[in-house]
Amino acid sequence: DTAVSQTPKYLVTQMGNDKSIKCEQNLGHDTMYWYKQDSKKFLKIMFSYNNKELIINETVPNRFSPKSPDKAHLNLHINSLELGDSAVYFCASSPGQRPYGYTFGSGTRLTVV
Amino acid sequence: AQSVTQLDSQVPVFEEAPVELRCNYSSSVSVYLFWYVQYPNQGLQLLLKYLSGSTLVKGINGFEAEFNKSQTSFHLRKPSVHISDTAEYFCAVSDMGGYNKLIFGAGTRLAVHP
């Protein structure tokens, strides 16, 4: 069983479209995250939820909206996609707000054309 | 605010040679330190972490790292690398009072040659 699973793995879409990426974890963790990895492999946090509550919201365009229906799921919806949104998006989870280290999903490669 | 500098973007090395991947951090508060590995087209996997106590930390796959507070460094070492160690390695820092937010370095590409 995959601990942190993301769907889809690949997403190719046109500029201006709206798309969603889904993430689910079966580890019983309380905290989930979205990170963006750009073409130079640089990783930057976007959002974090703890027990369905938003606790980290970095400087991200408001076209990006996370949603956590329950503590096992964290989805990312992106409106009006732009070329610069092309990246790999990683979901991760951890057992709480303690430094236990994350468990990452395998990523969603988003390509905007 | 914290920041992480990985001093080498690429490290080529021959199989069975030792390797050191360098990481320096900057922070005004005490921090936790991590190393992650990313194999091609995969997510990141935790190699090891420093939270407190002994400054020499052992991780998976034969890797170890040493925390040096005076030099604000957390270098990763392996005495003998394998072809399978070829991957991207990321150093990360999290402050002790925060929400477990990880700040990552830019990564070091380790290329092991036969």
Image (tube, grey):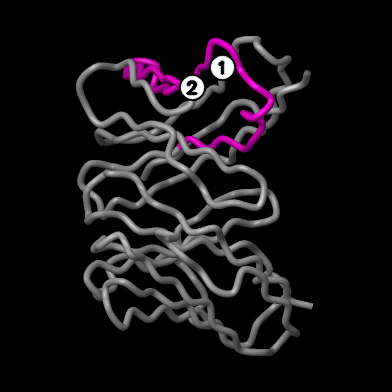
- The CA distance from mark 2 to mark 1 is 6 Å
Q: Residues within 10 Å of mark 1 (few under 14, many from 20)?
A: some
Choose the circle earlier in sequence order: 2 or 1. Answer: 1
Magenta-drawn stretch contains B70: yes
Taking the magenta stretch, the answer to whether it contains residue B9 is no
Name the kind of residue labelled 1 in the image.
Glu
Does label 1 lie on the same chain as label 2? Answer: yes
The residue sitting at 31% across, 29% down in the picture is B50
Q: Chain of mark 1?
A: B
In the rendered structure, which segment of residues is drawn in magenta?
B62-91
Q: Position of residue A31 (x, y in %)?
A: 28, 62
Taking B12 as reference, is B51 above or below it?
A: below
Callout 1 secondary element: strand
Q: Which residue is mark 1?
A: B20
Q: Residue at x 54, y 22 (%)?
A: B22
Q: Quadrant of residue A15?
A: bottom right
- Give the label on residue B76, or none: 2
At a point 49% along the width and 60% down the height, the residue shown is: A35
SS type, badge 2: strand
